[in-house]
Amino acid sequence: MQTKKIKVPVMADLHNRGEKAEYLYWVGCAGAFDDRYKKVAAAFAKILTFLDVSYAVLGKEETCTGDPARRAGNEMVYQMQAMQNIETFKTYDIKKVITICPHCYNIFKNEYPDLGADFEVISYVSFLADMMRSGQLKIDDSVLHDTIITYHDPCYLGRGNNIYEDPRSLLRKISPVLKEMKRNKSHALCCGAGGAQMFKEAEKGNKEIFIERTEEALKTGAEIIATACPFCMTMITDGLKYKNREEEIKNLDIAELIVKALKI
């Protein structure tokens, strides 16, 4: 089934018409500015539209959560950004936020409440898994049925917030050939970009973490490495390029895989 080109609703436009969306779709810095992750942001918007979910984005009113600033030690910038976001949410009476970035999810859920935030935060993988369990999301398992997939656990979904089964339940529906890396779930290896490491030069050592993790993924024999985080996607993609395997093995986000399965 093909869908027409979608028009993503914007909170301010709905507000001006006296309307309100049930969910704020928080796109995040990567979804807004990174060329690769823009495709993931668009894929999730397609799914929301396909499922007829009441949602909207902030558009130009969306700013960074402040997570990179806090991880890098700049508490003042973090609090300035966080308070600005909290006030924007209050303006539109936002009660439910869906994020496609585990870093945004974690800081919204676990750290914003210290500054007075009062809204529900939902990871997109949990949202999609709930939609699948309720029968609203019906994934065609014939599209990628025989494709070998491995899944890399993002730190802020897995160890940070104990979200392990939701992404796997989606991937097993897309393809029953889901192969785990040697280190997975609570023992999974970080991609190497967390804690603001993404924005600094590598430190001295024998091997960079993203190379080690990519090697673990390649040992599974997977044709697709599934990720659910913009930081992880960048690092795993770099790892595949380092290994000269980017042409034969794809790094795709779970939202992109679902779009393929839905044929939208």
Image (spheres, grey):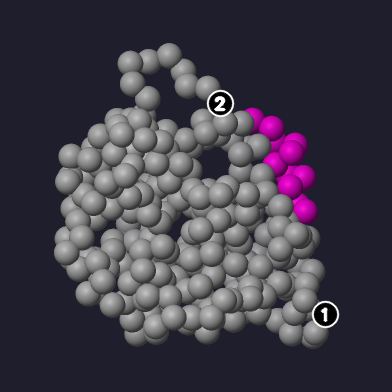
Vertical order, 129 against 197 (above or below): below
**Residue 98 position in % (x across, y down):** 55, 66
Task: Identify the residue at image location x=49%, y=59%.
Answer: 40
Which labelled disc corresponds to residue 234? none
Image quarter for residue 31? bottom right
In which quadrant of the rendered image does the C terminus lie? bottom left
Q: What is the crowding at mark 2: few (fewer than 14 residues within 10 Å), some, or many (at least 20)? A: few
Q: Is residue 79 magenta?
A: yes
Image spot of residue 118 (x, y percent): 66, 64
Q: In the rendered view of the protein, which quadrant contains the N terminus?
A: bottom left
By secondary structure, the bulk of the magenta-drawn segment is best described as helix
Provide the residue designation for mark 1.
16
Q: Nearer the viewer, residue 225 or 107?
A: 225
According to the image, label 2 marks what residue? 200
Horizontal arrangement in the rendering, residue 110 relative to residue 62 (left or right): left
Q: From where the camera sits, is residue 213 visible?
A: no
Q: Amino acid at mark 2?
A: Lys
**Position above or below: 84 against 192:** below
**Rendered view: 187 above or below 208:** below
Q: Amino acid at mark 1?
A: Asn
Along the line of sight, the residue nearer the viewer: 262 or 254: 262
Question: Looking at this rendering, what residue extends furthest in the right direction?
Answer: 16
Give the answer, above or below, for where 108 lies relative to 211: below
Q: Residue at x 40, y 47 (%)?
A: 154
Tell me the magenta residue range: 73-84
| Front-lying residue, 114 or 180 | 180
Question: How far from the left and from the top, in percent, is residue 156?
Answer: 45, 48
Dot 1: what SS?
helix
